[in-house]
Amino acid sequence: SPEYQKMYYHLLRCFSDADVSMNGRIRKDDFDALVDVAAAAPRKFGFAPQASEQYVSVEERKEARANLFKSINTEGTGEISFQEFLAWAMEHIKSKVLRGATPWKAGVGKLSLIQPSSAEEFVEFLKAATSSASNPQHKDLYFHLLRCFTDADATMSGVIDADGFDKLIDIAAIAPRKYGFAPSAAAMFKTDAERKESRAVLFKTIDKDGGGTISFDEFLNWAMKHIKGKVTGGVKAEYQPMAIEEDASLAAKNLPIYDEASSPSDFATFCKTAVTDKSSPEYQKMYYHLLRCFSDADVSMNGRIRKDDFDALVDV
């Protein structure tokens, strides 16, 4: 298409602008600048954050981009060619638009479920996601698991009991079941009672304090270890793949900062309704607003906020 041709020359321009040594190759230090050059266009329309919004420090930014550079420079030469950059950039852009390119600041579609296009892509994604917390795949997996958890949080209280955990397991298993990496509940258990009993036992191992509920950080910690154990051990698609019904339950959910009030009194009314009526749309909006605030401040992406991060959370 003419669009591909224009994208080709756009990326070529980005590459050549960053090629300060003019030898046709980009080193790790130059790659940092290349990312910013290439990000100018999506940032113009709000589809990508500014580096200052994405990273808490220059050091964090450079470390994250150095790790990204290594993933592109598969031969470990310390330099990447335009061919390597072009291949990576096209796949990166494709992955973004296939999930629905939406403005970054609005939080639209931030709670997105992982929907890989093949078994191989799914495994590679999980390997990357669990290998380093600085990988973009790790962030996608974090929000995937956050989406699974909040979908199972029927009471919208921020915690899941044993019954909710039974539902949570089935939500989280949709992606691996699609390609035969996990068996269906019907194949694993003879009866509903057996399934619930087995999952109740697993729930107790995650509910360390025995309080009868688990929070997102407890689920996240268990899920990340569970997934890493599977992919490290050489996961195989040994079960019958399951057809997944593509309905509204799989659509990306918004995670916006609330800014709909038109006046101080309007905002006060919204807050009053939100804190007094859990069945109201206002409560639901407040729930996702606070979830967005929390996830924005969770720089370690472990589901918990440290004292230093809490300072930023209050401002958000």
Image: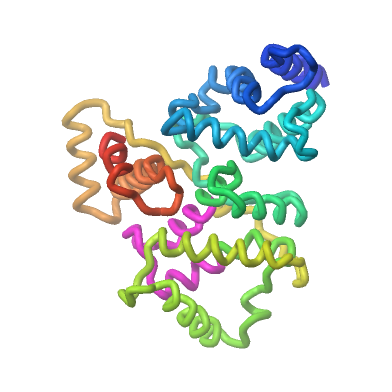
Q: Is residue 297 left or right of residue 152?
A: left
Q: Main secondary structure of the magenta part?
A: helix
Q: Quadrant of residue 23?
A: top right
- Location of residue 230 with respect to 52 vertically, above or below: below
**Residue that appears at 47% across and 62% down:** 221
Total label count?
Answer: 0
- Residue 32 figure quarter: top right
Q: 174 left or right of 43? A: right
Quadrant housing the C terminus: top left
Residue 161: x and y, percent? 38, 71
| Residue 200, horizontal then vertical, whole percent | 46, 80
Looking at the image, residue 279 sits to the left or right of residue 143; the answer is: left
State whether residue 286 is above or below residue 181.
above
Q: Is residue 38 above or below residue 74?
A: above
Say which residue appears at 65% left-offset and 54% top-offset.
126
Determine the residue positioned at 28% across, 47% down: 307
Task: Please state the horizontal and vertical placement of residue 121, each as a whole percent of the image.
Answer: 74, 50
The foreground one among 16 and 219 is 16
Is residue 64 located in the magenta-colored stretch of the structure? no
State whether residue 32 appears in this view. Answer: yes
The coloring applied to the image is rainbow
Say which of 147 and 24 sits in front.
24
| Nearest to the observer: residue 126 or residue 147 | 126
> From where the camera sits, is residue 251 visible?
no
Residue interval drawn in magenta:
144-170
Q: Quadrant of the N terminus?
A: top right
Q: Residue at x 79, y 23 (%)?
A: 82
The stretch drawn in magenta includes residue 148: yes
Residue 159 percent across, percent down from the top left: 35, 63
